[in-house]
Amino acid sequence: MKIISSETMRDLDARTIANKRVASLELMERAGKQCSEQIELFCSQLAPHHKKRLIILCGPGNNGGDGFVIARYLTSKFEVKTYCTHKQDKLSPDAKTNSSKVSELCEFEASSQLLNKITEGDIIIDCLFGTGLNRALTGEYETLVNSINASQLPVISVDSPSGLLSDGQVPSAAIKATITLSIGLPKTSYFQNDGPAHVGSLINLDIGFSKDYITQAPSEGQAFFAQDAKKTLQSFTYNSHKYTRGQCLIIAGSELYNGAPIIAADSAAVSGAGMVILAHESLRTPQNPGIICLTKPPDIIKSHFFEKSQSVLIGPGIEINDKNKKLFTHLIKSDKALVIDASAIDLIADNKTLFPRNAPTIITPHAGELQRLAKGLNINHSDLSKAAQHIAQNLSIQVLLKGPQSKIYNEQGAFSYNTSGNWALSTAGSGDALAGIIASLWAKKDINYYEQAQLGCFIHGKSVDFYTGAKRSFTVDLFPSLISKVLHSLSPLA
């Protein structure tokens, strides 16, 4: 999905209204309705004592207008209280119109008292300033935002966390949102400078802007959202069988690290491939008994399992020894779609003369692994994003740089931001699951490998977004069931 600047978004909005494609009040109604649906979905995952009230904070502009629409939709389902920072006659015309429909729920000119209104069990809906803010928050607003951030309460920001400027800078204070509901198209501020630390989870809402206008709008980059995932998810025919769905081979594990191959294989088995082969060094077996396990295989390259596999994953938990170095070189020379993860990434520098390969290749490093690889390739690694881009272009491979808002680079160096996931992923074994998902998606023939890599990263992140327990309690054995839920949310036919 195209990323645009806040200025472009305002132009798109104004053009839509001026050419009578959609009236301004109708756009506000659509935005508020869709936001209310997402808020209701978020609340459905919380215990009752964590959702006693919705506190909707409205500013004077159209962002506040969205808040009044949200209040109208949710007042029959929750206890709702709306606080507006200005007098009603000082609001924008559309905000004033919608505020009049929920006047009984609103307290106007309330900024000086807001700090005393927020209590435990409240969920805060931030409709203060949106993307139109062009200066630092000061005085009461700065104090209010800092207090909200210190409250440890969930905050859902509509279009932008208040205080975040259009270039992603936070000159004084800004809301640290749990979720940001992007209206229309994602903005550059979500991904630049201080933006990633403030937007939380991102959900984009399509409120019906003209596709022609969106196509004509200048792009500032790409991001991968649920809408993209729905379009990218592979479909299978009524007569599909395990071989048409694809076979992937996972070469992983060691005596010391024998959990990694299990995580990768179990995740692969629920992500689309019809057959998953696990070649590993342990007697441990996956949860899924349908996975074929080859324990201490003598020469996997010469086996029919390798021959019939469309994709191969190497790396999770492997030991760097002469045997695996030789195996890695054979894989690089093969015609298999190759996913390279964990320790195997460290073997690329010694085989750099074998790149580019004649088959799709992706590496999935975290920051430390990318730094080591860049150093081994004599590439400047002071800026990891530039190093990842350089490696992708030089080796003609895809690079998935893991982290908050993971970036996926294609062979030409263009990249897309992933928008799913949260800090629950920061646990051992999470990366093994990601590698397994991608290997599974890459097992099918005649696919767009870059799109499938983006999809894999999105599914991986969305899995923990679907987890309803305490984030710190998430464990990687939950991936298979959560992956299934994500896929079913993307398509009823998944």
Image (spheres, rainbow, N blue to C red):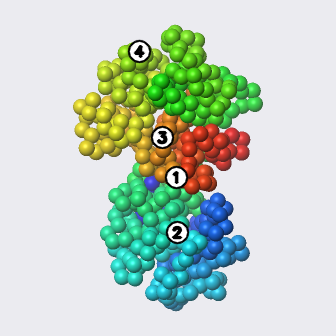
- Asked whether disc 2 touches disc 1, contact meaning CB atoms under 8 Å apart, the reply is no
Answer with the quarter of the image where residue 147 lies.
bottom left
Secondary structure under the numbered disc 2 in the rendered image: loop
Q: Residue at x 53, y 87 (%)?
A: 108
Question: Which residue position is annotated with label 4?
Answer: 323
Question: Which residue position is annotated with label 3?
Answer: 428
Mark 3 vs mark 1: which is more N-terminal?
Answer: 3
Residue 438 vertical position relative to residue 95 in the rendered view, above or below? above
Label 2 Cα crowd, 10 Å radius (few <14 / some 14-19 / many 20+): some
Label 1 Cα crowd, 10 Å radius (few <14 / some 14-19 / many 20+): few
Label 3 Cα crowd, 10 Å radius (few <14 / some 14-19 / many 20+): few
Residue 154 vertical position relative to residue 480 in the rendered view, above or below? below
Question: Which residue position is annotated with label 1?
Answer: 472
Mark 2 vs mark 1: which is more N-terminal?
Answer: 2
In the image, 488: left or right of 24?
A: right
Q: Residue at x 32, y 69 (%)?
A: 171
Q: Position of residue 38 (x, y in %)?
A: 62, 62
- Asked whether disc 1 touches disc 4, contact meaning CB atoms under 8 Å apart, the reply is no
